[in-house]
Every structure is written in C-alpha cells, then in structure tokens.
Image (cartoon, grey):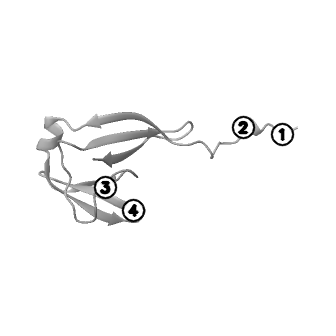
Amino acid sequence: MFDFSKLPTFNLSWSESDRTKLTSADKAEIESSEVVQRTYGLAICFYLKGGGHRDLMLSRDCRLKLGDSADLDKGEVVTLSRKGDEDIYRWEE
C-alpha cells in the first residue's frame, strides 16, 4: 500500500500568522512608494533612499490602485503561512 502522507499537500489554505507595522527605521529608508503592475498582480514598490527598490505584493483586501502611493503609517505587512511552504508577505492598508 502506498503511503500518501509522504506526498506534499497542496490544498491547504494560507492563513495569517502575523501583521506588522513599519518601524520609524523602516520608514526612514523609504524615499517614495507606488503601486505597480507585476507579473502576478499589483505590488507596492518601495523606492529606497540608498538606491534600488523592493516590491511587496498587495493583499487581496488592499484597496490601493495602480499609481497610488502607500500610507506608511496606516499600512501593514501581513505574513501568510501554510504548512510545508515558506511564508509569504503582502501589503495591506
């Protein structure tokens, strides 16, 4: 008999495991932000004062639209977890 428990599970839902506000130090590194279109949907692009940028996909509940800026005081980084997978992060405000 085959042991199906050895196979990865794909039907588990992601669940929220954490919600974090940006710290003053985090905000101090950000020059500006803009909602941009990426391959898998909308993301908030944080343009950093030191150069470069970092993208964070928007959560399903986020109401920001293409071209909007993030409100660094209201927004939160949401951590989603699922057994057998690495955490994923989303921006929500």
Q: How crowded is mark 1: few (under 14 residues within 10 Å), some or many (20 or more)?
A: few
- Residue of label 1: 2
The three-letter amino acid code for the residue at tag 2 is Lys
Q: Which of marks 1 and 4 is nearer the N terminus?
A: 1
Q: How far apart are marks 3 and 2 (CA)?
A: 40 Å
The three-letter amino acid code for the residue at tag 4 is Gly
As drawn, the label of residue 63 is 3
* Circle nearer the viewer, 1 or 4: 4
Q: Earlier in the sequence, mark 3 or mark 2?
A: 2
- Residue of label 4: 41
As drawn, the label of residue 6 is 2
* Circle nearer the viewer, 3 or 2: 3
Element assignment for label 1: loop
- Residue at the location (11% across, 51% down)? 49
Q: Earlier in the sequence, mark 3 or mark 4?
A: 4
The N terminus lies in quadrant: top right
The three-letter amino acid code for the residue at tag 1 is Phe
Q: Distance between the residues labelled 2 and 4?
A: 33 Å
Q: How far apart are marks 3 and 1 (CA)?
A: 46 Å
The three-letter amino acid code for the residue at tag 3 is Arg
Element assignment for label 3: loop
- Residue at the location (51% across, 42% down)? 14
| Image marks 3 and 2: residues in contact by CB distance under 8 Å | no
Q: Earlier in the sequence, mark 2 or mark 4?
A: 2
Element assignment for label 2: helix
Q: Which of marks 3 and 1 is nearer the N terminus?
A: 1
Q: How far apart are marks 3 and 4 (CA)?
A: 13 Å
- Residue at the location (76% across, 39% down)? 4
* Circle nearer the viewer, 2 or 4: 4
Task: Residue 23: name its quadrant.
Answer: top left
